[in-house]
Image (cartoon, helix red, strand yellow):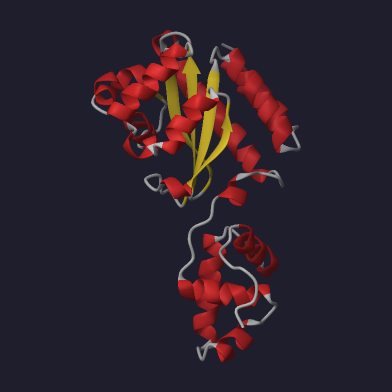
């Protein structure tokens, strides 16, 4: 494992990365230096981790079959390791929850598949890229996680936090691009008009609503779409199929 006492040096290396691709290359190198043979990261919208539709894989070096099993069977909804990690301020060892995982058939099968690929134990943890943006990270090891000291585990989480926060600051970060919260019918109607360039006053007039009500709907839609401007919100809604063409 790398010397995590030099975390300030790692911070400088992370800060020098200007694209997500560069950051992920460094991340993979760091993970390998830590002795892990695989890693994955998932993002959640608005802290909700029990809705598979709000789960976005960000980066994964686990075998593709394992990722497909995990996402395709919505394992996150019943994963006791993830639940424990998301409720904890420190990383959680897979092996520490063997009793709980043995009681969940999907988890038992997942860990069996991991063992077939040489993954004997792991560490799962949560980080925050910014308020409301939970990033869940899991590292798989070919040996027992008990070989890693508690001090190094805590320092490892600190390193993950630095990676995640810098990643969120990059212009091509994938979190806001992939995760949106569903819009209501009224919000879809309003955003369709926003996409056509209508002002809030024009939208209010066409919908026979007050400008204040439309302002609230637009603000709420921006939040759900992780957007800060009308063009960005309209583009995001269109990209996710939430608004399609003209409704006139």
Relative height, residue 180 to residue 187 (above, below) = above
**Which one is in front, 119 or 26?**
119
Looking at the image, residue 189 sits to the left or right of residue 47; the answer is: right
For residue 121, say whether it is visible: no
Looking at the image, residue 201 sits to the left or right of residue 83; the answer is: right
Please state the horizontal and vertical placement of residue 180, each as a whole percent of the image: 53, 55
Relative height, residue 105 to residue 193 (above, below) = above
Relative height, residue 112 to residue 18 (above, below) = above
Please state the horizontal and vertical placement of residue 241, each as a whole percent of the image: 58, 61
Picture quadrant where residue 20 is located: top right
Please state the horizontal and vertical placement of residue 48, each as a whole percent of the image: 41, 49
For residue 56, say whether it is visible: yes
| Quadrant for the N terminus in the image | top right
**Which one is in front, 178 or 149?**
178
Residue at left offset 63%, top offset 63%: 238
Please state the horizontal and vertical placement of residue 9, each as a whole percent of the image: 68, 22
Residue at left offset 51%, top offset 37%: 42
| Quadrant for the C terminus in the image | bottom right
Residue at left offset 53%, top offset 22%: 63
Looking at the image, residue 229 sits to the left or right of residue 57; the answer is: right
């Amino acid at each position: 494992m790398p010397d995590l006492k030099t975390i300030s040096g790692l911070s400088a290396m992370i800060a020098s990365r200007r694209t997500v691709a560069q950051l992920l290359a460094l991340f993979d190198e760091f993970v390998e230096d830590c002795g892990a043979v695989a890693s994955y990261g998932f993002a959640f919208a608005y802290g909700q981790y029990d809705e598979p539709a709000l789960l976005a894989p960000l980066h994964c070096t686990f075998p593709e079959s394992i990722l497909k099993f995990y996402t395709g069977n919505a394992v996150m909804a019943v994963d006791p390791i993830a639940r424990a990690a998301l409720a904890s301020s420190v990383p959680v060892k897979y092996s520490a929850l063997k009793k709980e995982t043995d009681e969940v058939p999907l988890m038992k099968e997942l860990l069996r598949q991991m063992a077939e690929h040489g993954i004997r134990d792991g560490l799962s943890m949560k980080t925050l890229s910014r308020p409301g943006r939970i990033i869940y990270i899991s590292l798989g090891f070919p040996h027992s996680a008990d070989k890693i000291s508690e001090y190094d585990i805590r320092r490892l989480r600190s390193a993950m936090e630095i990676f995640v926060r810098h990643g969120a600051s990059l212009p091509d970060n994938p979190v806001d691009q992939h995760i949106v919260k569903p819009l209501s019918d009224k919000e879809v109607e309003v955003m369709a008009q926003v996409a056509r360039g209508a002002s809030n006053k024009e939208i209010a007039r066409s919908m026979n609503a007050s400008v204040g009500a439309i302002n609230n709907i637009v603000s709420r839609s921006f939040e759900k779409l992780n957007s800060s401007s009308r063009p960005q919100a309209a583009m995001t809604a269109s990209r996710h199929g939430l608004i399609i063409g003209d409704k006139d």
